[in-house]
Amino acid sequence: MKGLRAVVVSTAVLVGLVAAPQPALAADPSYRTLGAANNPDWMSSLADSTGLSALSIPGTHDTMSIHGGSLTQTQEDFGDSGGTLARQLEAGIRMVDIRARVNAGNTFTIHHGATYQNANFDDVLGRLSAFLAAHPRETVVMRLKQECTGELGSCTDASGQQSFADIFDAYVRRNTTLFWTPSVNRASGAALPTLGAVRGRVVLAVMNGPNGGVIDHYGLAQFAGWHDGSSTYVQDEYNVPNVGAIATKRDQVRRFLDATSAGDPAALYVNFASGSSIFAQPQQVAGGAWGVQGVNPFLLGYLNEGSEVHTPVTRTGALMLDFPGSGLISKVISVNPGGPGSGG
């Protein structure tokens, strides 16, 4: 996983940390209650003319990561072979973060670092296709990342295979109606579309290489500068060195939320609420630990606060969450003007 790439630790230390008793992280409306969320058609009430940039989108960081233990898992487990993705889509998640390893036979398998997540890219595309066929007024935004760096804690791509881009192109050719075509053109980035132009399709936002940066020109032109960590339209300060530093992560998410509301109305902003390290596991950053409030409950509280407390959030962009709760998902959706629960 990203936060572990530069960290070299002994097996004894790792085992000790994982085995040590952890504080209880109780499920609540912000955390670990995705199974209670049911928002399969929330985009259907939005006008076709709505720009993708105007949307408030619940998303998941490392969408498929359900295996590997507390240092690696980022999402509630709703089943292998894309079962977890299917539940997220029904819950209302509309931006996904897919991490792929180049496998034998010029295929992609889904990994988080060294850990195979018991799913392949065909599972991902099949679940997306089935969902969008049943809910044709929805769209899903995808960030695709070549996961393997070959370094400690990561995976290594299979040798003798085609390039990541060539393999992806073959998947696109086999799924010609699934992707919004301008976003999967490796020769030129796409302008941000309206919702009406992409209903029933997957929009590729960016294709990232294993060490940051973008591969060719896939995705949306505005993300040409999306590298490892933060960039103009992305907040991804993923290194949370210890539990005490969760407070810093909360502030980074808050500041970017405020910047999104005040930012370029023609741009899509992506705000990663996730973070981790050996000493601050993904579940702790999301849900809280040792008396420190997690990012998820902070977010739900901040979005619920009125103008007497701070300038209200008028647009969240895509919020990329670990272990999201049903109340947080619904709150993000409600920020959309004219959307369910918005009152607009």
Image: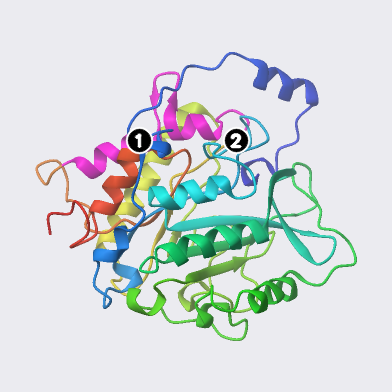
- Badge 1 amino acid: Ser
Q: Residues within 10 Å of mark 1 (few under 14, many from 20)?
A: many
Give the answer, above or below, for where 312 lies relative to 308: below
120 left or right of 284 in image: right
SS label for mark 1: loop
- Badge 2 amino acid: Ser
Name the residue at 61% across, 29% down: 70
175 left or right of 51 in image: right
Which residue does the numbered mark 2 point to in the structure image?
277
Q: Measured from the top left, where is residue 69 in percent x and y?
A: 65, 30
SS label for mark 2: loop
Asked if the magenta segment contains residue 235, the reply would be no
Which quarter of the rendering shows the C terminus? Answer: bottom left
Which quarter of the rendering shows the N terminus? Answer: top right
Name the residue at 60% across, 35% down: 277
Mark 1 to mark 2 CA distance (whole Å): 22 Å
| Residue 249 seen anywhere in this rendered image of the structure | yes
Name the residue at 63% across, 43% down: 80
Give the answer, above or below, for where 233 lies relative to 235: below
Give the answer, above or below, for where 28 lies relative to 199: above
